[in-house]
Image (cartoon, helix red, strand yellow):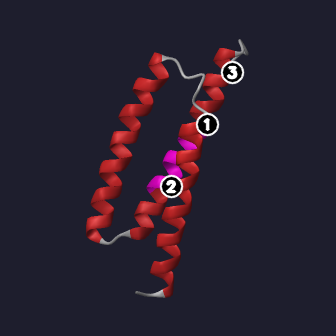
Amino acid sequence: MSNKENQQIQEIINITKNINHLLDNCTHNFNQSHLIELSKRFELVLAQCKFWEETGNNARQVYDLRNFGMWLCDKIAQAEDEFWGKENS
């Protein structure tokens, strides 16, 4: 395995740990609608990552996980704004 592949695998592990942290610690103010949207999006990213893993495309797996992580951060911010009664920007 090349150094680049090892770096990509380590990045996949790190991003996954960060996503798990967000899911475990930052979604407590999600309402049912948020949870349904999260579930659908999470199922999609899991299917994508499985496909990219099977085809050996670690770079695309990193891209999709980063994209999901950023979406999740935005969704958490939206849920917090809604929970605390702030106007959406």
SS state under label 1: helix
Q: Quadrant of residue 29?
A: top right
x then y, percent, for residue 19: 54, 48
Q: Quadrant of the C terminus?
A: top right
Asked whether, in this view, residue 48 is left or right of residue 80, the answer is: left
Count of numbered circles in the view: 3
Q: Residues within 10 Å of mark 1 (few under 14, many from 20)?
A: few
Q: Is residue 58 magenta?
A: no
**Residue bearing the label numbered 2:** 16
Q: Residues within 10 Å of mark 3 (few under 14, many from 20)?
A: some
Q: Residue at x 59, y 41 (%)?
A: 22
Q: Amino acid at mark 1?
A: Asn
Q: Is residue 67 magenta?
A: yes
Q: Amino acid at mark 2?
A: Thr
SS state under label 3: helix
Q: Main secondary structure of the magenta part?
A: helix
**Residue bearing the label numbered 3:** 81
Q: Amino acid at mark 3?
A: Asp
**Placement of 46 over or under 87, stated as above or below:** below
Near-viewer residue (87 or 46): 46
**Placement of 89 over or under 40, stated as above or below:** above
Q: Quadrant of residue 54?
A: bottom left
Q: Residues within 10 Å of mark 2 (few under 14, many from 20)?
A: some
**Residue bearing the label numbered 1:** 25
Q: Residue at x 42, y 28 (%)?
A: 37
User: For the residues marked 1 and 3, what is the alpha-carbon distance in whole angstroms?
Assistant: 16 Å
